[in-house]
């Protein structure tokens, strides 16, 4: 009798463990982090959201795609472009020779998956124009193929292998950024609250709307849905008058897009990047980590 009870207990535990470790993955969201202004916190936001998602549930699979030839995101994933020379990058897969292949995917020590950039964005910009696709639809096209798996984790399609995708964009609005916007279900725009950043917002929102309407409709056909746009104030310092003033300006002009959360300036973000750790691995209780936790709840309803 006692043996039967033990056997029953064993079955229950192993079933629970299996449920815990063998998690099914299905893609819920693709967020493109975009702003043609430099240094507004795009890459830091991608890394912080990824870190926060994994802190929420370490079994989630989060894929980070680096479309910026500065390779900051790839470097934070400990990708060394010199040591890795010759290994495929996402830029290779966006070129004509990458057609009918998926994007290359590697795994970072921090737990997220990533597809690295390379320094040669000019070649990609040129190559996007000579394919049988609209130049802004190439990344979307590559998502249709099984990923080029460099992790040994048995990755298959983007849809079945990952739960969330975040795309880091260069500080410019060329076709590479257009590819991120077209492929994404949401465009997240980190911005600082000052006159120059405010001026750039209207240009960016016009470009996003044009790409969204013209190309996503064309590519997605019936299943076409309007993209969500979220403006995220970054590196805020609540005491400055200029910030308060421009927060009101953004609220008046683009209030419907403005996130409820602002990310406060916090030196821990930079310290963490110095040792290749996202904010949740470096200092999970600091101000920026708290703000990013609220942002993740707002974006993903977690
Ligand atoms: N909340 C924050 N508090 C303090 N420093 C921050 C914060 N967010 C980002 N930074 C710092 O600001 C600088 C610019 O950030 P980041 O590289 O993420 O911006 P970016 O928009 O990706 O820049 P680029 O346009 O050059 O790609 C970095 O040194 C980063 O560490
Ligand atoms: Mg960046």
Image (cartoon, rainbow, N blue to C red):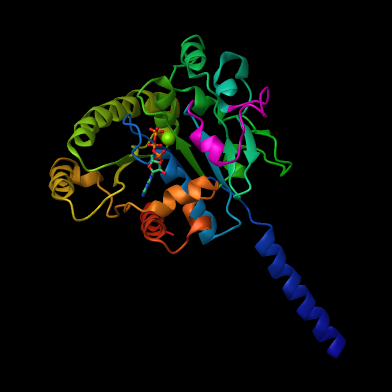
Which SS does the magenta portion mostly show? loop
Range drawn in magenta? 69-89
Picture quarter containing residue 6? bottom right
Q: Give the image location of residue 145, x and y in percent.
A: 62, 29
**Which residue is found at the position 31% from the left and 31% from the top?**
37
**Which residue is found at the position 31% from the left and 53% from the top?**
264
In magenta stretch: residue 112: no
Q: Give the image location of residue 154, x and y in percent.
A: 72, 42
Along the horizontal axis of the image, is 270 left or right of 241? right
The relative height of residue 240 versus residue 213 in the rendered view (above or below) is below
Between residues 57 and 18, which one lies in front from this camera angle? 57
Q: Give the image location of residue 24, x and y in percent.
A: 63, 53
Between residues 296 and 80, which one lies in front from this camera angle? 80
- Please say whether residue 272 is visible from this viewpoint: yes
Along the horizontal axis of the image, is 265 left or right of 139? left
In magenta stretch: residue 83: yes
The relative height of residue 150 versus residue 251 in the rendered view (above or below) is above
Ligand 1's image quarter is top left
The relative height of residue 211 versus residue 246 in the rendered view (above or below) is above
**Which residue is found at the position 44% from the left and 23% from the top?**
176
- Please say whether residue 28 is visible from this viewpoint: no
**Which residue is found at the position 55% from the left and 46% from the top?**
276
């Amino acid at each position: 009798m006692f043996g039967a009870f033990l056997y029953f207990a064993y079955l229950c535990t192993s079933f629970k463990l299996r449920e815990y470790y063998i998690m099914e993955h299905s893609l819920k969201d693709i967020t493109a982090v975009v702003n043609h202004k430099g240094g507004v916190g795009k890459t830091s936001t991608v890394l912080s959201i990824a870190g926060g998602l994994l802190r929420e549930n370490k079994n989630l699979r989060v894929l980070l795609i680096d479309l910026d030839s500065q390779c900051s995101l790839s470097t934070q994933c400990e990708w060394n472009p010199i040591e890795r020379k010759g290994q495929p990058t996402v830029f290779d897969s966006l070129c004509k020779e990458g057609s009918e292949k998926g994007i290359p995917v590697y795994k970072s020590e921090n737990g997220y998956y990533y597809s690295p950039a390379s320094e040669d964005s000019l070649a990609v910009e040129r190559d996007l124009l000579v394919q049988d696709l609209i130049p802004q639809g190439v990344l979307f096209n590559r998502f249709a193929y099984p990923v080029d798996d460099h992790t040994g984790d048995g990755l298959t399609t983007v849809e079945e292998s990952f739960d969330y995708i975040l795309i880091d964009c260069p500080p410019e609005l060329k076709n590479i950024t257009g590819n991120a916007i077209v492929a994404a279900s949401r465009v997240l725009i980190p911005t600082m609250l000052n006159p120059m950043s405010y001026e750039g917002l209207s240009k960016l929102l016009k470009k996003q709307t044009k790409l969204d309407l013209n190309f996503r409709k064309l590519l997605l056909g019936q299943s076409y849905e309007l993209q969500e746009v979220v403006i995220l104030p970054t590196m805020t310092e609540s005491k400055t008058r200029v910030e308060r003033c421009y927060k009101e300006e953004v609220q008046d002009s683009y209030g419907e897009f403005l996130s409820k959360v602002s990310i406060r300036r916090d030196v821990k973000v930079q310290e963490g990047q110095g040792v290749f750790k996202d904010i949740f691995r470096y200092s999970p209780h600091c101000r920026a980590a708290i703000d990013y936790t609220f942002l993740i709840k707002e974006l993903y309803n977690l």
